[in-house]
Image (tube, rainbow, N blue to C red):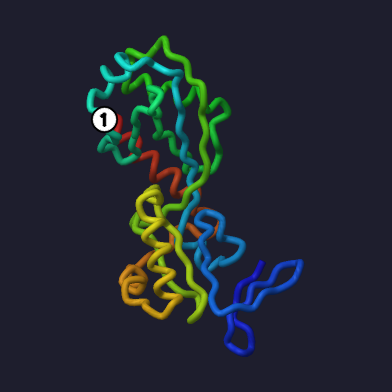
Amino acid sequence: MDVRTDGGGRACVRTAQGEVRCDAVLLAGNANLGAVAPQLARRIMPVGTYIMATEPLGRARAERLIPSRAAVCDTQFVLDYYRLSDDDRLLFGGRVSYSTVSPQDLPATMRRGMLRVFPQLGDVAVTHAWGGFVDITMNRAPDFGRLAPDIYYLQGFSGHGLALTGLAGQLAAEAIAGQAERFDLFARLQHRPFPGGDLLRTPALVLGMLWYRLRDLF
């Protein structure tokens, strides 16, 4: 897939099956944009993030864990986050893979993390565990901009996508419709590429994050 402007200045998307010319293109593939826009991929890194759910705990036991039923995250650099579901399961997230290699036994890996925070749940089973890849930027701020006057991109939500993607879509729609002031505020944020080039940037990130994991422990 290739995205560029054609000879007449219109946005053009080419695939093996054909091409589409249009007034505007919005690239919003996050961790999967590398093959489409390599110049953008240098400013983001794909990381695996995971979450699990326990079996139902019952209302009384669930509310002994989190009496307010609030959504919680800690202050570690590689943070844990958790909340209760409507059916009184504990949803627990926080295992992150910076190497892009997912844990072989994800439920067991997530359960160990949960028991560090809630050791009283040793008798509770994990019924679901899942994950996927998100993208992060060096400064953890979202990366908005244009590759050409009518080719826009949104990426780098860095784990805050649930809160920010709705806003991002609205700002991109405004910009495409000719009102770009709010979009351009974000586009002015400066983003550096991850160091190490194509070959070494993932190992460099893994080593750097190992330092932060050790700091979190002590």
Is residue 59 depicted above or below 150 in this figure?
above
Circle 1 residue: 218
155 displayed left or right of 140: right
- Res 33 quadrant in image: bottom right
- Give the percent coordinates (x, y) of residue 163: 35, 51
Q: Residue at 58% x, 28% y: name it.
A: 104
- Residue that sits furthest to the left in the current view: 68
Q: Residue at 44% x, 21% y: name it.
A: 54
210 displayed left or right of 30: left
Quarter placement of the C terminus = top left
192 displayed left or right of 101: left
Q: Residue at 38% x, 68% y: name it.
A: 171
- Residue 113 visible to the viewer: no
- Residue that sits furthest to the top in the current view: 123
- Res 21 quadrant in image: bottom right
Q: For this rendering, which residue is in front, 107 or 201?
A: 107
Specify the amino acid type for callout 1: Phe
